[in-house]
Image (cartoon, grey):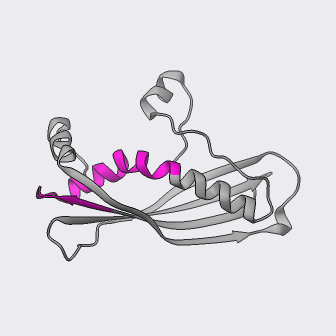
Amino acid sequence: MSDNIEPVEYARILTNTLLKKLGFLEIHSVLHLENYEAGEMSVDIIKNDTQFPRANDADMYIILDKYKITGNVKNRPVFDIDTTIILLLETKEKIDDIFLTKFSKSTGKLIIYPYLRQTVQDLTSKMGLPALSLPLWQNPTTIKEEKKEAVPV
């Protein structure tokens, strides 16, 4: 699905949209203790799926984003975290999947990332691993200019 929407139109709709709820619907974590050893841990964050189920209220819109976070030491998985995050939007505007897709890929990602970051830090600490802090989010445009790679959310 294309996420082509004019920036002015996106901004106009966004101005009239309220984020009513952000929450974790599911969090599944698995510790692969047999793979754990001292060493630098790398993290992969993969956005698996985005869905837009319809809300009962005509003014409400739902975005479900699914992420998989894997911590690796020496290319072997030490932990996996699968999570589903819900964003509930309220607006008097008539919005479609094009707007919701754009929102999920841009504004929604900026909203979700700090919560995802905190969840990874909390869960790795509770797993008995060193608390893992994901890097702070950087705007991909800035990163391209600096010739670095963004966290692949």
Asked whether, in this view, residue 30 is left or right of residue 27, the answer is right
Where 106 sits versus 86, above or below?
above
* Residue at image coords 80%, 51%: 74
Magenta segment boundaries in residue numbering: 88-114
User: Quick one: 59 or 69, which is closer to the camera?
Assistant: 59
- Residue depicted at x 20% and y 36%: 7
* Place of residue 128 in the rendered image (x, y in percent of width and height, measured from the top left): 80, 63
- Farthest residue in the bottom direction? 56
- Say if residue 153 shows up in the picture: no
- Please check the rendered image and state whether residue 96 is part of the magenta-colored stretch, yes or no: yes
Vertical relation: 141 (above or below) 129: above
**Could you tell me residue 111's position as x and y percent?**
41, 49
Give the camera-side residue of 58 and 8. Answer: 58
The chief SS type of the magenta part is: helix
- Residue at image location 46% in from the left, 26% down from the top: 142
Q: Is residue 14 magenta?
A: no
- Residue 106 in the figure: left or right of residue 31: left
The quadrant of the picture occupied by the N terminus is bottom left
Residue 19 locus on image (x, y percent): 30, 55
Q: Residue furthest right?
A: 38
Where residue 55 sits, quadrant-wise, is bottom left
